[in-house]
Image (cartoon, rainbow, N blue to C red):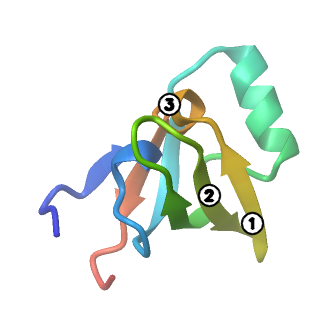
Amino acid sequence: MSQETQLTLGRMEVGQTGTIIQILGGRGLTQRLEALGIRPGKKVTKISSMLFRGPVTLRVNHTQVALGFGMANKILIEIDKSA
């Protein structure tokens, strides 16, 4: 398991949990993610990811959400140390 405490959602390992600390995108991306319940301060768990830049599935607010690889790599996460 990686020792980094901050990384993008795309680089998280499946099963890891963390808190969103920043969205590295413009207003359009931020608004689209907020409509899905994805915003700074929210806890997320990475459920699955596909090889070779495929979609990433995460759990936020007891809901599963699938995001494209590019979007996932613009979401900065603080990994829970207890996980």
Mark 3 and mark 2 lie on one chain; the one further toward the N terminus is: 2
Given residues 67 and 20, the one toward you in this image is: 67
Residue at x-position 12% and y-position 62%: 3
Q: Residues within 10 Å of mark 3 (few under 14, many from 20)?
A: some
Q: Which of the labelled discs sits on residue 37, or is there none? A: none
Residue found 34% across the figure and 47% down from its top: 11
Question: Which residue lies under the disc numbered 1?
Answer: 64
Q: Which residue is mark 3?
A: 74
* Name of the residue lying farthest toward the left: 3
Residue furthest right in the image: 35
Q: Which residue shows up at 81% across the image and 31% down it?
A: 32
Task: State whether residue 22 is above or below residue 4.
Answer: above
For badge 1, the amino acid type reads Gln
> Along the polypeptide, which appears first: circle 3 or circle 1?
1
Q: Nearer the viewer, mark 3 or mark 2?
A: 2
Q: CA distance from mark 1 to mark 2?
A: 7 Å
Counting residues from the start of the chain, the first of labels 1 and 2 encountered is: 2
Circle 1/circle 2 CB separation < 8 Å: yes
- Mark 3 to mark 2 CA distance (whole Å): 14 Å
Which element is circle 3 on? loop
